[in-house]
Image: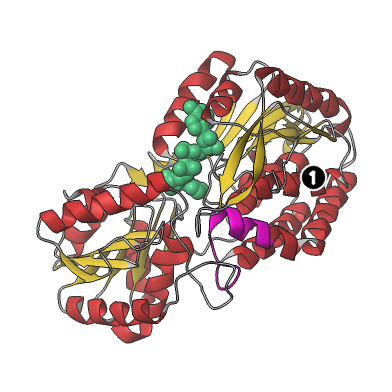
Amino acid sequence: MTEQTYALLIDGVKVATNDHFTVLNPANGQTVGHAPKASTAQLDAAVQAARTAFKKWSAVSDEERQQACLNIAAKIEEHSEELATLLTKEQGKPLNGLGSRFEIGGAKVWTQVTAALQILPKVLQDTEEGKVVLHRKPIGVVGSITPWNWPVMIAIWHIIPAVRTGNTVVCKPSPFTPLSTIRLIELMNEVLPAGVVNCITGDDSLGAAMSTHQGIDKIVFTGSCATGQKVMMSAAATMKRLTLELGGNDAGIILPDCDPKEIAEGLFWGAFINNGQTCAAMKRLYVHESLHDQVCEELANVVRTIPMGDGLDEANVIGPIQNTMQFEKVKGLVEDAKRKGARILTGGEAGEGLFYPTTLIAGVDNGWPIVDEEQFGPVLPIISYRDIDEVIERANDSPNGLGGSVWSKDIEKAKEIASRLECGSVWINKHGAIQPNAPFGGVKGSGIGVEFGEEGLAEYTNIQVIFS
Ligand code: NAD
C-alpha cells in the first residue's frame, strides 16, 4: 500500500486496527487512503476513554474550556490547506469557490464563535420564600455520527458545543469521507486532554452500535431521515438525549415582482452549493407563472458559466457527486421525470464517472418523485404557480421542514409568507445561509432539536434546578 493508512484516535493515542477500508476520490476513482475499521472492543475502548475523561473535563473551568476551543480553531487555521486538500480528495468538492477552503474556514469560524458563547445560571426566583436557580450541566459522553456532504464542518458542529459545555465525545464520520475527520481529531488531540475527543471509523453498523451503547449519554446525528429514525428507535432503551439533523426538501418561492436576471446567481448557489448535496439547499423552486420562462432562461445562463470538474483543479467550482449510491439516486429521479414528460433545460444525461451535469427540469409538479423526494444532487425542478395561497400549501406539502426561501422586492410581504412556511429557517432573497449565532434545525420529519447559538449549546446540557 503506498497510500496512507490511518488509525483510530482513542484516549489521545493513535490506535491501529486489523481491518481497513479504502476511501476513493469521487473525481477519478483513485484511492485516497485506507481508513481503520474499528472492532466492537475498540468502540467500547473509545467510550470508556471518553467516560474517564469526562470526570475531569466536566469539572474544569469555563475559561479553560473556552481557551481549548480557541486552541482548536488555531490548529484548524494552521493546517487549513492540508485539511482542505484531503477533504477535496475524499469528498470531491473543489478547493475553490464554496468548496473545501470555504468549509475549513467555516469550521474555524464556527469554533471561534461557539467558544465565545456562554450559558449562565438563571435565577428563576429570589424572594423571601427562597431562591430558585436553573443550572446547566454537561450530559456526559456524546456520540457524534456525521454524513459525507460537509464532513469537517458537521464534525465541528457536533464536537465543539459538546466540549465547550464540558462533555466528552466519540465521533464516527461517514465511511465515504472519514479521513479529513480523523485528521481533524488528531489535531484537536494536540491541544486537548486525552480522551476528550475520540474518533472511530467503520461501516454503518458502528453507528448502530453507538445508538444502543450503554456508555453513550447523547447522540448527535446528522444524516438521512431514514437513518435518523433508526437512531431514535435504538436510543430509546438507554434514554439517550438526541439531536437529529435530518433531510430536507426546501422550497423556494419566487414572487412576481422579482427581476429574474438579478436573482439568478443567488438561486443557483441556493440550489447547487456543494453540487446540491446540502441538507438546506433549495430542492424545488416555485416560480410565478408570469416569470417562469424568464427565470428558467436566466438560471440556465448561469448554469452554463459554472465550471465543473476535478476539485484539485483551481478552475473548477463544482465537483462530482460524492458516491455511486447518490449518483444512481439522482440519475433515477431524472430518468423518471423524463419518462413522465418533463422538459430538461440543462444537463439531464449522466456524465463521465460520478460527474453529473447541473440539471434544470421544468414541466413538473408536486406528486412527481423529483419534486416530492430529496434529490440531494445537482438537479432542480422548477414548478410554475399562479396563486400564493396555493403555492404555500404546495411548499408545505412535505413530510420534511428544514428550510425555505421567499424571493421578492417587497420584504414585508416576503416575511409574511415566510411565517406561513412549515420549516425551521426561512431566507428572504437568498437560500441556505446559516450562521453560528442563529439556531438551525428542522421541524416535522427533518429532525429534533437545533444546532448553533445558545439554544444549540443548551442541547449539550441537562437542566438542574437548585431550590435554596
Ligand atoms: P446517512 O443517514 O446514510 O448516514 C449518516 C451517518 O449515519 C453515516 O455516518 C452512517 O455511517 C451512519 N449510519 C448509517 N446507518 C446507521 C444506523 N443504523 N445507525 C446509526 N448510524 C448509522 O446519510 P448520508 O447519506 O451520509 O447524508 C445525507 C443525508 O444527510 C441527506 O438526507 C441530508 O439532507 C442529510 N443532512 C442533513 C443535515 C442537517 O443539518 N439537517 C446536514 C447534512 C446532511
Residue 274 locus on image (x, y percent): 48, 62
State whether residue 74 appears in this view: yes
State whether residue 119 appears in this view: no
Image point (78%, 21%), residue name: 48
Seen as rendered, the residue at the extreme front is: 1
Q: Between 286 and 202, which is closer to the camera in this rendering?
A: 202
Q: Is residue 180 above or below residue 240?
A: below
Q: How is the image coloured?
A: secondary structure
Q: Is residue 34 above or below residue 304?
A: above
Dot 1, how many residues are within 10 Å of its Cα: few (below 14), some (14-19), or many (20+)? Answer: many
Q: Which of the 4 image quarters holds residue 12?
A: top right
Membership of 91 in magenta stretch: yes
Query: Ligand 1 near label 1 (Cβ, under 8 Å)?
Result: no
Q: Which of the 4 image quarters holds residue 210?
A: top right
Q: Between 68 and 155, which is closer to the camera in this rendering?
A: 155
For the record, the magenta segment spans: 84-98
Q: Which quadrant holds the N terminus?
A: top right
As drawn, is 66 to the left or to the right of 328? right
As drawn, is 123 to the left or to the right of 294? right
As drawn, is 125 to the left or to the right of 400? right
Q: Which residue in the structure is indicated by mark 1?
A: 186
Looking at the rendered structure, the secondary structure element under dot 1 is helix
Residue 147 locus on image (x, y percent): 53, 44
Q: Between 345 and 351, which is closer to the camera in this rendering?
A: 351
Image point (58%, 26%), residue name: 206
Q: Is residue 112 above or below residue 446?
A: below
Residue 369 locus on image (x, y percent): 21, 48
Residue 293 locus on image (x, y percent): 18, 79
Membership of 45 in magenta stretch: no
Image point (54%, 62%), residue name: 93
Q: Which kind of residue does numbered mark 1 sit on?
A: Glu
